[in-house]
Image (tube, coloured by chain):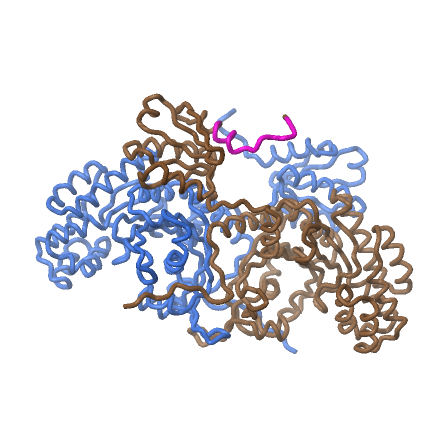
Chain colours: A blue, B brown
Amino acid sequence: MGLIVPRTLKGFRDYPPAAMIPRERLIDTARRVYRSYGFSPIDTPALEYLEILSGKGGEETDKQLYQFEDHGGRRVGLRFDLTVPLARFAAMHVGELGTPFKRYHIATVWRGENTQRGRYREFMQCDFDTIGTRSNTADIETALVIHDLLTAIGFRQFRIHVNNRMVLNGLLETMGLAERSAAILRALDKLPKIGPDRVIAEMQAQADVAAADAGRIVALSEIRGSTAEVLRQLAQLLAGSSSGVEGMERLGQLAAAVQAAGVPEDRFCIDLSIARGLDYYTGTVFETFLSALPAIGSVCSGGRYDNLAALYTTQELPGIGASLGLDRLLAAMEELGMIEQKTTAAEVFIALFDADHLHDYLRIAAALRASGLGVELFPEARKLGQQLKYADRRGYRAAIVAGSDDFAAGICQLKDLAAGTQQPIPLTADCSSLIAAIRSLLTPPNIDGP
Amino acid sequence: MGLIVPRTLKGFRDYPPAAMIPRERLIDTARRVYRSYGFSPIDTPALEYLEILSGKGGEETDKQLYQFEDHGGRRVGLRFDLTVPLARFAAMHVGELGTPFKRYHIATVWRGENTQRGRYREFMQCDFDTIGTRSNTADIETALVIHDLLTAIGFRQFRIHVNNRMVLNGLLETMGLAERSAAILRALDKLPKIGPDRVIAEMQAQADVAAADAGRIVALSEIRGSTAEVLRQLAQLLAGSSSGVEGMERLGQLAAAVQAAGVPEDRFCIDLSIARGLDYYTGTVFETFLSALPAIGSVCSGGRYDNLAALYTTQELPGIGASLGLDRLLAAMEELGMIEQKTTAAEVFIALFDADHLHDYLRIAAALRASGLGVELFPEARKLGQQLKYADRRGYRAAIVAGSDDFAAGICQLKDLAAGTQQPIPLTADCSSLIAAIRSLLTPPNIDGP
């Protein structure tokens, strides 16, 4: 029988350790930050009844749905996001869980996208949402979670852009243009690309908006300045629109609260030009940009919606949430040199230098592990050079080598594989000297002094 | 338009927080232990070419495969285990990764099983393997990982049963019965259920084994006693079988090394009656039983194989691995009262007692988070009783309540929701007194004294 060619499907990826280790670290960080705000984990099935999934993400998404008939003749599909499953989940369980319900969900989704656009057909989403409350406190917390996520990952230079859909909607209402908001938003979304004149022209042509009104709409998106200045200009533009003013007030409260909670001023701005999601979001919207890499787009986005689960239940479930763009962030971290090139998550390598001393190596490894250090013991008594080359390739810095002479002298050799140096360390039953020496080798010196 | 009935597919489960929190904790523990031995994470696609998956797990598995045609007309399937993807992955990447290659893989798999047997169609596997080495050190480490996994999860009373397939195979070789080993093993697997006499009868009937030989085979499985005693009896039975003796020696080395590494004697035994996997395993095999719940079966099993990826590459890849039975373990932990009934992973609840003090609550929350505590701030200024009921239901023990009078006096109230008590705590900018008071409230007293 011939061999089967080992290959993966187009648009699907294997994650070897070098890719998976930073991925797991990022997911761990997100989980820790979500939990630190009282968000709880949930999971839902990868497969759902097709009727739950289809028609929920628009025509494009329907086309991309992986769907088939299961063994029982049911039409089923693989989830294409975590929002539709959340809506279905909330409709089924929110009665017993109670509101507000704060959940995070980190899981794989599938879309049969055109891979020529550099998109993958399998990727992970990393969402958090607070449902069952209209309180602006939830919006404020969403901004704080985004801030803490980015700093916990290691970013210092980034900015969270916040808008509120009620502001523009309120303005459109006062102009009698509420019905045409979808077409107007489509034009407005092109502002950074085509500039104000062509956007105004498009609004006139596509949405039949009077030139003066189109001018005011574009002017709103172009308001810039400090929070106080933006709010001052907004108040003038929105006079007479109660929902516009409410949106503005929520923005003002959010800006003040985020500052009170300790977010530095340069990491937050009101940006009336962002308009995420044509119809889905109804209040606060967020986008987050890395100062070093603005071109990669928003790395954490989200917003407020009025009614999450309207398709499945008559219970009204307003909420707010956001999603961390894992793949985009990992690409950015790679580009910014924030990812260590390691294929091991352990700290210490022990060479199997002399197979007769296997029990000694095992005892040392056990003592180091008990102190919290990860330890890899090489399984074969190959030549030392080969073993150390393996360790170096995996990204180990600390390696322990000990032969009969060392054990007789009550020591082992601790090698610094990066520096190419080694030092003899006394071996005691609890390995305390060795543990201290390893920790000092692995801890980067504090360059600011003690 | 009518509502869509929110429901999940038969055999699939939602995981609400109460189920997901212990699940995440268990997975975190497994990941930490795997990493502490130098195993690195990988992931592979949920969907594979059908030809990669089909025919790999036997007829039963083929029938259970979720398979369909994708958008590009490719026949694809959802992975039904993590071993076949590992084989395919190893065939593609082992050249660049080098051996030994130690990986863990914690991921979802799908099988269209008959749910009447109480099985699920979507479940998680939690595997670790060392590939590319025949060294018994890898077998020893596998036993140590299993031991550390169970103790890290919180079990104290369990036993790892170890056998080596070479022992029985060696015996069969000396009897000229090697060809009939599959049928013999099938009969032998029934030993605990039907007893020695009927097993001997079945071996005679089904595999044409002479009564004396069948008796010796059953005798081998029935050897009991200390490691030394088992090895002594084995040596007699296996005289003349070089591969049997090799298996015996590997068992002996493994027993000695595991003891040297600190595994208590009662947590490990050589058990010649276990015979995991009829044909797949070729050397060491492991099963792990909880002393309190032996009937639930092995919670961590695995073994050594000769050639992982023979279907995809001519490179020979021997290896050894095991798999933690997550669902089984969680069921056992639930039954043994090892799972806290909480639907939050945070430690502290802050009531939004007075909306005018939102900024103060946000500042307190930020200070507590900076110290590593998870904090949920209630988003709505509902009645205090309602807020505390919510906190209690979620499983919070520590709740902070502060109104204008408290802030004026420079204090807040720290409530112990379990005891129904509260104490005033001075509020400073860094909240250090509050943090100390919360930690002391949350730390169970040391009943053994200081």
| Residue pictured at 76% horizontal, 47% vertical | B266
- Classify residue B414 by image quadrant: top left
The location of residue A185, given as percent across then percent down, is 21, 57
Please determine whether, in this image, residue A161 is positioned above or below residue B282.
Answer: above
Q: Which residues are magenta?
A: B437-449
Instruction: Left or right? Give the position of A197 relative to B296.
Output: left
Q: Nearer the viewer, residue B185 or A418?
A: B185
Quadrant holding the N terminus of chain A: bottom right
User: In the image, what residue occupies the spot 78% across and 36% down?
Assistant: A406
Location of residue A374 by image quarter:
top right
Please say if A144 is above or below A202.
Answer: above
Residue at far top of view: B409
* Residue A386 visible somewhere in the drawing: no
Residue B386 percent location from the top left of the image: 36, 40
- Asked if residue A94 is positioned above or below residue A8 in the image, the reply reads above
Q: Where's residue B83, x and y in %?
A: 61, 63
Task: Name the residue nearer the viewer: B422 or A113.
Answer: B422
As rendered, which of B221 and A251 lies closer to the eye? B221
Please report the residue visible at 47 percent of the width from the left and 49 percent of the height from the top: A27
The reply, left or right, for residue A137 in relation to residue A367 is left
Res. B262 in view: yes
Task: Please state which of residues B45 and A104 is positioned toward the viewer in this rendering.
Answer: A104
Residue B440 is a magenta residue: yes
Q: Position of residue B34 (x, y in %)?
A: 62, 49
Q: Is residue A143 left or right of residue B397?
A: left
